[in-house]
Structure formats: C-alpha cells, structure tokens
Amino acid sequence: MDKVQTTSNMTGERIRKYLSEGKRFDGRKMEEFRDIIIETGISKNAEGSVRVKIGKTEVFVGIKMGIGVPYPDSPDKGNMMVTAELLPLSSPRFETGPPKFPSIELARVIDRGIRESKFIDFEKLCIKEGEKVWTVFIDIYSINDDGNLLDAAGIGAITALKNAKMPKYDEENEKILYGELTNESIPLSKEIPISITAHKIGDNLIIDPTREEEDISKTRVTIGSADGIISSMQKGELKELSIEEFNKVLDLITKVERDVFKKIEKFLK
C-alpha cells in the first residue's frame, strides 16, 4: 500500500545526497536517536500512562485493565489488546474515521513485540481458569508526527506497562473498582523488550528518521529484542534487503537497543 508523502522531490534528493556523504540534516549520526523525553502518570483515569517525545514526535500511551473471558486455546491466560489511533491533530496526512492501514500496522507491530517477548506473564492474569481473566488494554495515540511513531509507541507501551498498577477487584460482587489502584504491578518479566526500526534510504541505513527521511524510505525493519535476544520482527515498505544489508541491520539495532535502554532505564524500574 502506498504511503502518503508530503516531502518534496527536491528535499528528498538533498536528503539522499547528504546521507551518501554520511550526514543528516539535523547533524545526527546514522545510528543516533533524537532526544527522548518521557513523562509518566499523564492520565488519572488510566492504570498507567506515559507521554513519549522523540525529538518533535510525540505519542501518548495508556493502560487499562478489564475482565473478560479467556481465549479457548489459552483458558488459563489473560488477554491483551493493542489499539492505535493516529489523530489528525498530529499530522495532516491522518484522517478521522475507521482505522486505516498505518494505525492497524502500528498496533500489530507493538502487539507482536510485547506478546512474542513474553514480557507480560499472562498466566498470572488468570482469575478463574476457563471463565475469567484480566485483559490488558494498550491504547496508543499520536500527538505529533515528525517521524518514527513506531519506536515512540514501542517505548511508550513498555514504559506504561512498567508504571501501571492493578485496579482493586471486588471478588464478592465480581467487579473492578476503577479509580482505586493497588500497589500491585502488572506481572512482567525482568527482560524488557525494546523495538527499534531501521530504515534504508538509497544505500544507507539510518535509525530514528524524521518525517522527511521517513517519507523517502523504501524499506524498514522493526526488530524487538531484549538483551540481544530477538523476539519479533516486521518488515515494511516494498524494497528488498540483501543478506549483507540485513546483517548490517541486525548489528545496528543491537547497538542502538543498548543505547536506548540506557536513556529510558530510569523509567523502567
């Protein structure tokens, strides 16, 4: 599916020329992230919430807990649902109405990164096997899109989960007492998955693209990993990667994952 592009051909050519010389418009290195700013406790109505800013890109992520019926193939495990809403206020390319491909893809990439890493211990979210389990709702909203919403949303999701608290549950009346939080955290593993996306522009691989860079990217790969162990992978856009290029992507993302973790570590304790 073709993506909406607002970057002019002239700007695109200048970006490609700069990258071929090992430079970026904002002075960053190819593998360098913009500044990452995280604020926690944004919403009083969520069990956990964060605002993540990567440069001018900004997302809000909220966690809500609900109670539902387990899936037939996992009667002793809780559920998770990830949704993403790309708001028109964040970019003129986003429209109101039913979710379109970019928002659906973003939600699925974040879902896969969390689910396949086993970050959430779903067995501990079982209330009564086969009948009642906790469901974790992860809601992602774009506030401003200046490129790399994928990584901003991924950082927001794991940070919000780490900061969330379980709501009180009235077992006698079988209902959640929303607004009353316990001191109990959502059951999570010690290994924290971080999703990083590499983009190929011309013959160059870059990390954390701006909107203009992202517009002219023909290939991207998002890899979720923890301590160098890969748990998820998603390729986007139409162009292929050679085996040599893919190995470079793996090396690049492994290095960047460590750098990003250091930047956000204090919010994950």
Image (cartoon, rainbow, N blue to C red):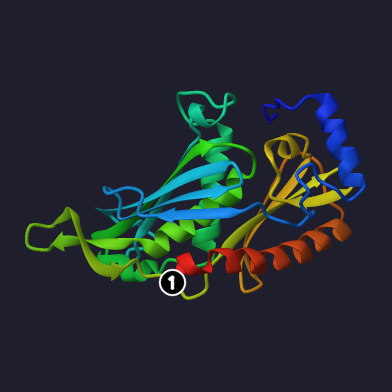
Residue 247 left/right relative to 69: right
132, above or below 100, in the image: below
Q: Residue at x 49, y 28 (%)?
A: 89
The quarter of the rendered structure image containing the C terminus is bottom left
* Spot occupied by residue 141 in the image (x, y as percentages of width and height): 46, 40
Residue 200 left/right relative to 260: right
Q: Is residue 128 visible?
A: no
Residue 253 left/right relative to 130: right
Specify the amino acid type for callout 1: Lys
Q: How many marks?
A: 1
In terms of image quadrants, where is residue 2?
top right
* Spot occupied by residue 248 in the image (x, y as percentages of width and height): 83, 61
Q: Residue furthest front?
A: 27
Element marked by disc 1: loop
* Spot occupied by residue 151 in the image (x, y as percentages of width and height): 60, 51
Q: Residue at x 32, y 63 (%)?
A: 75
* Spot occupied by residue 187 in the image (x, y as percentages of width and height): 36, 70
In terms of image quadrants, where is residue 226?
bottom right
Residue position marked by numbered label 1 in the rendering: 269
Q: Nearer the viewer, residue 150 or 241?
A: 150
2, above or below 51, in the image: above
Residue 133 left/right relative to 197: left
The quarter of the rendered structure image containing the N terminus is top right
- At label 1, counting other C-alpha atoms closer than 10 Å, the crowd grade (few under 14, some 14-19, many 20 or more) is few
Q: Residue at x 41, y 60 (%)?
A: 161
Q: Nearer the viewer, residue 257 or 120?
A: 257
Q: Is residue 173 visible?
A: yes
